[in-house]
């Protein structure tokens, strides 16, 4: 399955369908022009340089998130 998804034509068809970039550089030549030119899907080099990783979530916030998610999973 992974080998199939990594084929450039298949990766491009997924990008064309869901409008989400894929990491397969060889697939770009198969992506529709209007999708490939969309700068919200494929960021420019300048935009990529401005990206920063999110800040770490404080421990007290993680505890609340875990508590809420655990309640959700338990159906409460």
Image: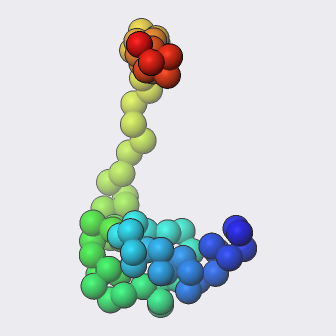
Quarter of the image with the N terminus in it? bottom right
Q: In this rendering, does residue 58 appear at all? A: no
Q: Is residue 5 left or right of residue 15?
A: right
Looking at the rendered structure, the number of numbered marks drawn on it comes to 0
Placement of 71 over or under 46, stated as above or below: above
Res 64 quadrant in image: top left
Res 6 quadrant in image: bottom right
Q: Nearer the viewer, residue 36 or 10?
A: 10
x and y, in percent, of residue 52 in the image: 38, 45
Quarter of the image with the C terminus in it? top left
Q: Residue at x 39, y 30 (%)?
A: 55
x and y, in percent, of residue 43 in the image: 34, 67
Q: Residue at x 54, y 68 (%)?
A: 23
Res 41 quadrant in image: bottom left
Placement of 72 over or under 46, stated as above or below: above
x and y, in percent, of residue 74 in the image: 50, 16
Placement of 26 over or under 22, stated as above or below: below
């Amino acid at each position: 399955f992974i080998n199939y998804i990594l084929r450039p034509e298949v990766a491009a068809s997924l990008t064309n369908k869901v409008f989400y970039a894929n990491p397969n550089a060889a697939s770009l030549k198969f992506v529709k022009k209007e999708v490939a030119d969309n700068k919200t899907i494929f960021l420019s080099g300048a935009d990529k340089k401005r990206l920063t990783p999110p800040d770490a979530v404080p421990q007290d916030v993680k505890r609340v998130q875990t508590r809420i998610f655990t309640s959700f999973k338990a159906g409460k």
